[in-house]
Image (cartoon, rainbow, N blue to C red):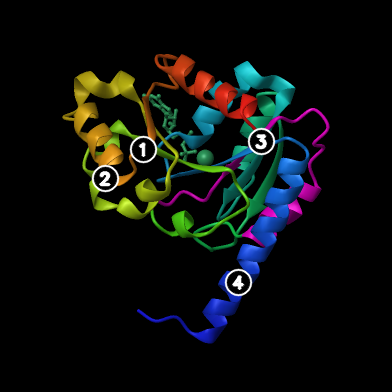
Amino acid sequence: MSRTKAQIDIAAKNRTLAAESRGVLRGRGIFTVNLIGSPGCGKTSLLEATARHFGERMAVIEGDIKTDLDAKRIEAAGIQAVQIETGGACHLDAAQVAGAIARLDLESVEILFIENVGNLVCPSSVDLGEDVKVAVVSLPEGDEKPAKYPALFVRAGAVVINKTDLLPYLDYSIERAAADCRKLSNKAVVMPLSCRTGEGMDMWISYLEGAIASR
Ligand SMILES: Nc1nc2c(ncn2[C@@H]2O[C@H](COP(=O)(O)OP(=O)(O)O)[C@@H](O)[C@H]2O)c(=O)[nH]1
Ligand SMILES: [Mg+2]
């Protein structure tokens, strides 16, 4: 499908703003993660569990269509958070994120997470100024989702397969999902884990600490 001139202009403006944010964040030595996955896959739960390790070294920008419920959850975990309500848009854009960055106190921050609007498709093609896109899937969604929704997984630097505690109750092959992710991106680090039990969280934390250290 060919794009209209207006769509091309919007995409160009987004790229410029994303590059500016990336410059600001990298200039401060901050590693930035754009967290993308379906509604309910556990993005906010993952950030709550991650907060226990990073404390004030991390900050969060929350994107939802409506409500500041997720920002409140992150603040309750002791982490500064800014909520963006898109009012209907199915993904965040670089202008919204630049506005949210300006509202954060970045003094002690080494890692910034942007939780995108819950959606496995649209957010994957919009640059927000991040260093890496991390895809989150979860067991109840079914193990064929990476193969069926490849756009995110070809761009993801890492994939979290969440809710491994539900394995006894579901027909889900972690091997199949992981193999499909690696087929779509041979660089992708695939991390099965459970935010609920903490199983596998050590690999996720080491991945992030490694990314911060190599900034
Ligand atoms: N069993 C199980 N449930 C989880 C896990 N992580 C998140 N959940 C649940 O999944 C639901 C959606 O989680 P949430 O973090 O709000 O997902 P988000 O919409 O992607 O931000 C909530 O009921 C969580 O308690 C997990 O590792 N195991
Ligand atoms: Mg959420």
User: Marks 1/3: CA distance?
Assistant: 23 Å
Residue contact between numbered discs 4 and 2, judged by CB atoms under 8 Å: no
Give amino acid for label 3: Lys
Residue 12: numbered disc: 4
Q: Amino acid at mark 4?
A: Ala
Q: Please, what is the three-letter code of the amino acid marked with disc 2?
A: Lys
> Can you identify the residue that label 2 sits on?
145
Q: CA–CA distance between discs 4 and 1?
A: 30 Å
- Image quadrant of ligand 1 equals top left
Residue visible at 66% across and 35% down? 72
Provide the residue designation for mark 1: 137
Q: Earlier in the sequence, mark 4 or mark 2?
A: 4
Magenta-drawn stretch contains 102: yes
User: Which quadrant of the figure contains the C terminus?
Assistant: top right
> Mark 1 and mark 4 in contact (Cβ < 8 Å)?
no
Q: Residue at x 61, y 28 (%)?
A: 214
Work out whether residue 174 or residue 196 is closer to the camera in this orientation and state it: 174
Disc 3 target residue: 72
Report the amino acid beneath label 1. Val
Q: Is residue 141 magenta?
A: no
> Marks 2/1: CA distance?
8 Å
Looking at the image, residue 156 sits to the left or right of residue 175; the answer is right
